[in-house]
Amino acid sequence: MSGRIDQLDADLIALLEAEPRIGVLECARRLRVARGTVQARLDKLVARGVIRSFGPEITPAAIGYTVTAFVTLEIRQRAGHQPVAQHLASIPEVLEAHTITGSGDLLCRLVARTNADLQRVIDQVVGHEGIVRAVTHIALAEQIPYRTLPLVRAAASPPG
């Protein structure tokens, strides 16, 4: 069943997303399955990397980081992606970075306190010798927040 989830997995994930502080016993009660079944499913979902965290989800704007930007980076190919990725990982405002295809090499999501602070963060990002160019897009408003539950529901449905 590698790569697939069933309806019970999807229901368990949905319940945990709706109520992250719910316990295993209460999950079992609501899903009408044995506590051991819920625990075994959770263990398998974690082991397979389906569930990667039970920690709190943070809203950057609520802690003062009100500006979100997406930055496409072009890097020097000779050294590869790893040195740049290590540099980016050292900058707290870089929330994620992905190797991409197309005109750039890496796509980063970062946050800043203000537009002026964004300039500071970008200067820090491009300060690495492996970065050749950066193109920045400031997000004006979030239309669809990061979500996975619709994908979980689709994955639990039969293909077709």
Image (cartoon, rainbow, N blue to C red):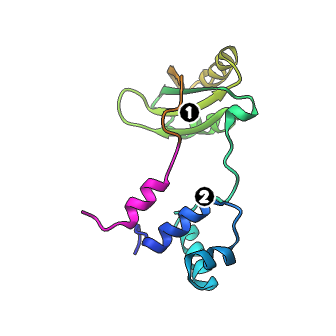
Q: Position of residue 31 (x, y in %)?
A: 56, 76
Q: Does the image show residue 107?
A: yes
Q: Are marks 2 and 1 in contact (CB under 8 Å)?
A: no
Residue at x-position 49% and y-position 55%: 149
* Rendered view: 36 above or below 95: below
Q: Is residue 113 left or right of residue 96?
A: right
Identified by mark 2, the residue type is: Ala
Q: Position of residue 68 (x, y in %)?
A: 59, 27
Q: Position of residue 108 (x, y in %)?
A: 54, 33
Q: Position of residue 62 (x, y in %)?
A: 72, 34
Part of the protein shown in magenta: 146-160
Residue 70 lies in magenta, yes or no? no
Residue at x-position 61% and y-position 78%: 28
Q: In the image shown, does 61 or 118 lie closer to the viewer?
A: 61
* Rendered view: 85 above or below 67: below
Residue at x-position 37% and y-position 36%: 101
Of helix, strand and loop, which one carries label 2? Answer: helix
Instruction: Return the mark for residue 34.
Output: none
What number of labels is visible? 2
Identified by mark 1, the residue type is: Arg
User: Dividing the picture into quarters, in which one does residue 100 lie?
Assistant: top left
Instruction: Give the residue pinned by disc 1.
Output: 109
Q: Does the image show residue 75?
A: no
Q: Residues within 10 Å of mark 2 (few under 14, many from 20)?
A: few
Residue 153 lies in magenta, yes or no? yes
* Rendered view: 159 above or below 97: below
2 or 1: mark nearer the eye? 2
User: Disc 2 and disc 1: Cα gap in Å?
Assistant: 25 Å
Quarter holding the C terminus is bottom left
Instruction: Give the residue pinned by disc 2.
Output: 18
